[in-house]
Image: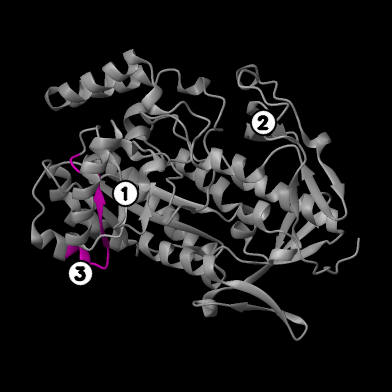
């Protein structure tokens, strides 16, 4: 296979998502759709394991439950260095990232809506033990969910890898350059976040900062701006003096933020005001309720952290199926890629870091983004706190031994935006990086080996 690249001009429109993901030169891939877009919408496979959702003649909404998805890879054709696909890759990627394969909350059955509203109306008067029993009851069949794949789903990332491999094979090249995902050659990225749900949790934040500091880890604190508790100026000052971040956590954490669009827009106005008052750039909704189509109204934020990778243990099912940040319009999404502490301790009733280690390993092996949400409220108790300290020790070890980058979420957002504006140019016989922040960027190479992508740095 010839390793040289032919720099012919192609239409980058159908290839935009792939090019943005790798930040490779525009003229190195050429993906085109081979079938009518007015086909069935449903699930299908690209190869043995990559699950897709979108318009495709072979797609089926029922086959996912039977585990017998049609494979469209034999329908992929190559002609004149272009790859012709029986689906629109941009549509499939959006459908997965934005959870469009899930029935929208607004179309839930009436009974489910009534149960949701009833639960949140009486929640303040329910004891913690009863709440946990009700939550475990609601999630009792979670292990039967076939998709997204537990405990980490990389369907989007694996689709990108496959599309790049197909493009390289079509062009008869075995190596192409791209901008490495993380600054200064870090292997992967991990962030620690703390959602503060109650006054008790707020009072524990100072101790939590001290615990994090013992392990050299800084975190963001998501604070509920209305009703739940008053936020003392001294606490804000303490968080910032410790070089941590202050973000906004919902409006009042009543489970109703996304109940309907009109209410959301009214609340979004107040949320934006709080973001301005607290100089907060990040947002996370209560209980990870979300509707990414409405995110444009959260105009004061640079990034959101409300979409889980796999949502089997959350009240709103779904998952973005990627272990990488991605843009939703102007908003950068930093997905939650590990299980929350509450779910680990009180739904799974697991007081070990085994699951977290498994998730970290799956993500780090593919150079992805690892994010944790540890609530001050749920690590006050000594047994839970000991588990959290074990996690910090584990992350500290990875940082030292495997060059894991552990910034604040805002630093990740800054880097990912800079990377999105950088470009590779071929000058004087070599590849060069252009754009603000290029001094931290590194060039890596995607290599085609036996039909699969490997990385050389």
Q: Could you tell whether 323 is left or right of 277 in the image?
A: right
Q: Could you tell whether 251 is left or right of 346 in the image?
A: left
Residue extent of the magenta highlight: 238-252
Callout 3: few (<14), some (14-19), or many (20+) C-alpha neighbours within 10 Å?
few
Q: Which mark is residue 287?
A: none
Percent of width and height locating residue 45: 70, 32
Percent of width and height locating residue 358: 52, 42
Percent of width and height locating residue 206: 17, 57
- Tell which of 88 and 217 is nearer to you: 88
Taking the spot 84% from the left edge, 58% from the top edge, the residue there is 171
How far is mark 3 from mark 1, CA to CA? 30 Å
Is residue 445 highlighted in magenta? no
Give the secondary structure at mark 3: helix
Of the 4 image quadrants, the one containing the N terminus is bottom right
Q: Could you tell whether 298 is left or right of 239 in the image?
A: right
Q: In front: mark 2 or mark 1?
A: 2
Taking the spot 47% from the left edge, 59% from the top edge, the residue there is 397
Q: Which mark is residue 38?
A: 2
Taking the spot 60% from the left edge, 66% from the top edge, the residue there is 180
Q: Which mark is residue 241?
A: 3
Percent of width and height locating residue 274: 18, 54
The numbered mark, 3 or 1, whose residue comes first in the sequence reads: 3
Q: Which mark is residue 297?
A: 1
């Amino acid at each position: 296979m010839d390793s040289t690249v032919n720099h012919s001009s192609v239409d980058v429109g159908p290839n935009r998502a792939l090019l943005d993901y790798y930040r490779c030169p525009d003229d190195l891939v050429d993906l085109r759709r081979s079938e009518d877009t007015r086909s069935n919408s449903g699930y299908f496979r690209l190869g043995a394991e990559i699950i897709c959702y979108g318009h495709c003649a072979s797609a089926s909404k029922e086959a996912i439950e039977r585990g017998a998805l049609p494979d469209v890879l034999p329908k992929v054709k190559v002609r004149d260095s272009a790859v012709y696909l029986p689906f629109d890759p941009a549509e499939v990627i959006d459908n997965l990232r934005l959870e469009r394969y899930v029935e929208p909350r607004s179309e839930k059955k009436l009974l489910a809506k009534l149960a949701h509203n009833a639960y949140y109306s009486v929640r303040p008067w329910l004891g913690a033990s009863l709440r946990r029993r009700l939550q475990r009851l609601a999630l009792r069949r979670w292990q039967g969910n076939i998709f997204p794949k537990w405990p980490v789903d990389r369907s989007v990332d694996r689709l990108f890898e496959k599309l790049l491999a197909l493009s390289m094979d079509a062009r008869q090249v075995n190596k192409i350059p791209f901008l490495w995902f993380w600054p200064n050659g870090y292997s992967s990225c991990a962030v620690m976040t703390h959602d503060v749900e109650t006054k008790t949790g707020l009072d524990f934040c100072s101790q939590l900062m001290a615990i994090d500091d013992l392990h050299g880890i800084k975190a963001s604190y998501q604070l509920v701006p209305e009703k739940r508790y008053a936020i003392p100026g001294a606490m804000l000052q303490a968080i910032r003096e410790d070089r941590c971040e202050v973000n906004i956590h919902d409006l009042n954490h009543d489970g109703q933020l996304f109940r309907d669009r009109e209410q959301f827009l009214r609340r979004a106005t107040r949320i934006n005001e709080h973001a301005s008052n607290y100089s907060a750039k990040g947002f996370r909704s209560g209980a990870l309720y979300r509707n990414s189509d409405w995110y444009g109204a959260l105009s004061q934020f640079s990034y959101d952290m409300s979409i889980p990778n796999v949502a089997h243990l959350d009240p709103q099912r779904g998952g973005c199926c990627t272990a990488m940040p991605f843009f939703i319009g102007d908003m950068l999404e930093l997905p939650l890629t590990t299980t929350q502490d509450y779910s680990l301790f009180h739904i799974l009733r697991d007081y070990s870091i085994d699951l977290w280690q498994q998730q970290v390993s799956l993500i780090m092996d593919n150079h992805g983004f690892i994010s944790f949400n540890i609530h001050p409220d749920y690590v006050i108790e000594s047994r839970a706190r000991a588990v959290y300290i074990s996690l910090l020790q584990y992350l500290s070890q990875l940082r030292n031994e495997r060059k894991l980058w552990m910034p604040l979420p805002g630093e990740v957002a800054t880097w990912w935006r800079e990377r999105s504006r950088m470009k590779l140019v071929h000058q004087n016989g070599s590849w060069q990086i252009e754009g603000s922040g290029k001094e931290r960027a590194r060039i890596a190479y995607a290599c085609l080996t036996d039909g699969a992508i490997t990385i050389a740095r």
